[in-house]
Image (cartoon, grey):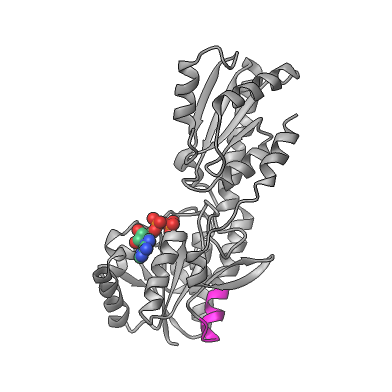
Amino acid sequence: MKRIAVITSGGDAPGMNAAIRAVVRTGLDKGWDIIGVRHGYVGLCSDNVIPLEARDVGGILQQGGTMLGSSRCPEFMTEEGRLKALRTLRQHSIDALVVIGGNGSQTGAHALSQMDFPVVGIASTIDNDLYGSEITIGVDTALNIALDAIDRLKVTASSHQRAFIVEVMGRDCGYLALMAGIAGGAEVIVIPEVETDPEAMAAELRAAYGRGKAHGIIVVAEGAEYNAEKLSHYFEKHRGRLGFELRATILGHVQRGGEPTAYDRLLGTRLGAAATDYLVKGEHGILLGLVKGAIGATPLAEAVSRKKKLDLRLLELARVLAK
Ligand code: ADP
């Protein structure tokens, strides 16, 4: 092993920079050259790469996003695109690639690894929907941003006897909504994994007010059947069902851009360092993540073919806690 490349792909996540920095500095420490790929798989398909030295990754630890840039790259989904990517890697005599990203990016990493190129994946997505890591880089920061918003909305909701819908990210996975809802003390949590009945939700909120609560907070995942827009429309149409005013706040990309928390910096750093350690051992075709509380590896084939399950008992717990 002489030269390795590092890439960030898909949705950016706070803590990716810590992972890049750790790959670069632990790789340099092992005597390797490190190459950074710009803008995700787009940079790999279009030969957009830069050498990375220790100073190039200075001052990025505390920044959200990714200093390498990221993208969604339809070209890489085709065999032709991946052959172009392989050409770039070979042209620069790169021996292995570290892919920092979520589900889609790791599926791409697996495809490259099946073309006999050594790849190590690092689990990084704010959605926490990647099999092979209990928690992924970016989740903790995104959760804390959502919580901050919920705490503030609770204050204004209590002052005006209003209900607030807070929509958090999560296209297919309700993890962020569920955890932010529990940590923020939401009255109702709406996630894609569970069917929603707006009438039952209205009844729950009315009951909460009946018990003397001064606010009603509904945390919804963007991918839920009834997201913020649909719920707002529903209660607009059926005015009076709730018995109080409803306002919606969609957090959207605000959740991505925050400064990484200590947890995400440390997780990114540990996973980045582990990537070069695994490569030294000659291990690749794997995803690195948090397994039973420690850094562990899962074959990429397994990580991208299995679905991570959300513990739905927590939804019941949230209901009890909202009493
Ligand atoms: P994330 O990694 O955050 O889940 P995406 O799902 O958008 O983000 O995936 C990022 C990129 O990974 C895609 O734009 C594409 O280039 C690549 N990718 C996704 N799925 C595949 C696939 N099945 N085969 C090859 N590449 C893929």
Q: Which quarter of the figure is the C terminus placed in?
A: top right
Asked if residue 173 can be seen in this view, the reply is yes
Is residue 270 covered in magenta?
no
Residue in the picture at 62% in, 72% down: 296
Residue in the picture at 45% in, 84% down: 32
Q: Is residue 275 above or below residue 153?
A: below
Q: Quadrant of residue 39?
A: bottom left
User: What x and y, as percent, mark residue 168?
Assistant: 52, 39
Of 42 and 222, nearer the camera is 222
Query: Seen in the image, is 102 located left or right of residue 317?
Result: left
First to last magenta residue range: 274-283
User: What x and y, as percent, mark residue 139?
Assistant: 57, 52
Query: Seen in the image, is 93 located left or right of residue 222?
Result: left
Query: Seen in the image, is 283 located left or right of residue 50?
Result: right
User: What x and y, as percent, mark residue 92?
Assistant: 31, 81
Is residue 282 covered in magenta?
yes
Query: Seen in the image, is 129 located left or right of residue 186?
Result: left
Q: Is residue 201 above or below residue 1?
A: above
Quarter for ligand 1? bottom left
Residue in the picture at 69% in, 65% down: 293
Q: Quadrant of residue 52?
A: bottom left
Would you say the magenta stretch is mainly helix, strand or loop?
A: helix
Asked if residue 60 can be seen in this view, the reply is no
Q: Is residue 7 above or below residue 315?
A: below
